[in-house]
Amino acid sequence: MDKFSKINCWRHKERRRSAVSIKPVKIETEYITLGQFLKLAEVIQSGGMAKWFLQEYAIFVNGEPENRRGKKLFADDTVDIPDFGSYIVKN
């Protein structure tokens, strides 16, 4: 891939990323763990998949990489999962 193609590819990804909406995920408690969140947001089918999913995919919580399934998420925290979407925690 030449330099020009790489730049166009990067621009396409940026446009796609900016066009993606942030999906709200409502919680009933003060916080939710990242593993529980993945299941509630229907990213994974069962809680048992959380450990595997966190090892296989890059997940960003408030812009920082995160791989702990016990990480507590509070209202207005954002979760970015490339190729899956962007989410925000809501009370």
Image (cartoon, rainbow, N blue to C red):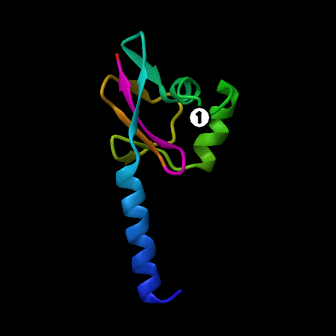
Identify the residue at image location x=45%, y=30%.
71
Asked whether residue 18 is drawn in magenta, I would say no
In terms of secondary structure, where does tag 1 sit?
A: loop
In the image, residue 35 sits, relative to residue 4, either above or below, namely above
Say which of 84 and 49 sits in front.
84
Q: Residue furthest top?
A: 28
Identify the residue at image location x=48%, y=43%.
85
Magenta highlight: main SS: strand
What x and y, as percent, mark residue 28?
Answer: 42, 10
What x and y, as percent, mark residue 6?
Answer: 45, 80
> Pointer 1: what residue?
43
Q: Residues within 10 Å of mark 1 (few under 14, many from 20)?
A: some
Identify the residue at image location x=59%, y=29%.
42
What x and y, as percent, mark residue 74?
Answer: 35, 23
Q: Residue furthest bottom?
A: 2
Q: If the image is split into quadrants, where does the C terminus sit?
A: top left
In the image, residue 60 sits, relative to residue 37, either above or below, namely below
Identify the residue at image location x=68%, y=29%.
45
Say which of 16 and 52 sits in front.
16
**Disc 1 residue type?**
Val
Span highlighted in magenta in the image: 82-90
In the image, residue 42 sits, relative to residue 58, either above or below, namely above
Q: Residue furthest left?
A: 76
Looking at the image, residue 67 sits to the left or right of residue 73; the answer is right
Give the quadrant of residue 16.
Answer: bottom left
